Image (cartoon, rainbow, N blue to C red):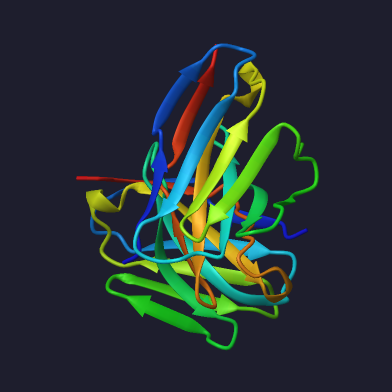
Amino acid sequence: KQEVTQIPAALSVPEGENLVLNCSFTDSAIYNLQWFRQDPGKGLTSLLLIQSSQREQTSGRLNASLDKSSGRSTLYIAASQPGDSATYLCAPDRGSTLGRLYFGRGTQLTVWP
Amino acid sequence: GAVVSQHPSRVICKSGTSVKIECRSLDFQATTMFWYRQFPKQSLMLMATSNEGSKATYEQGVEKDKFLINHASLTLSTLTVTSAHPEDSSFYICSAHRGAWEQFFGPGTRLTVL
């Protein structure tokens, strides 16, 4: 079973900082990896999806990298804003069990004005 | 983007009763849906894979007689928590799979069992 670890568990920063959120996973036989955002008491919003053949993916101020062989992914958030405050989750998707996502505990981000 | 709804968004029930939660894909057909549960300050844990027209596949440790899943159509899956107890209180989230890899999550259902 895939084990996912996210570091740090929590992060509190002033707005404007560039942030790095780390994700590691034990089974590198993945089809893709997704980063999600979860606001308190809400469902998940997909932020980025990186296919296993890709090394990175960008969307606006977000950039995610993937090192499949070492079982690591990193989410970079540029020029953070208070609206970025949420819990960020990564979820690798194994090809043999497509769609069954195993999540880490996430990184709880607070960006204060 | 695709929309997945859940109903109800919040439910409070007495111990011993059964609760049904619906998950609908509003603007696409989903042959596969997934059910997750999330305890406070914990991450989502996959409970089961719901396949349209066939039996659900449960993750290890999830009681299939406790959590009944029915995927009656390509847009609807239901999760019934039978004989609910306080330890079943949790946040239940569904997701619907589209195409090769897209997955869209519902807003979740907060279940509180008294």
- The answer to which quarter of the image holds residue A100 is bottom right
- The answer to which quarter of the image holds residue B89 is top right
Which corner quadrant holds the C terminus of chain B? Answer: top right
The x and y percentages for residue A13 are: 33, 48
* Residue at (27% x, 58% y) in the render: A80
* Residue at (60% x, 65% y) in the render: A99
**Nearer the observer, B40 or A17:** B40
**Nearer the observer, B38 or B103:** B103
Which corner quadrant holds the N terminus of chain B? Answer: bottom left
**Nearer the observer, B48 or A63:** B48
- The answer to which quarter of the image holds residue A33 is bottom right
Query: Can see residue A79?
Result: yes
The x and y percentages for residue B108 are: 44, 41
Q: Residue furthest left?
A: A113
* Residue at (60% x, 82% y) in the render: A52
The x and y percentages for residue A42 are: 38, 42
Horizontal side of residue B48 vs B76, given as left or right = right
* Residue at (58% x, 45% y) in the render: B36
Horizontal side of residue B19 vs B60, given as left or right = left
Q: Is residue B54 above or below residue A82?
A: below
Q: How many marks?
A: 0
Query: Can see residue A12?
Result: no
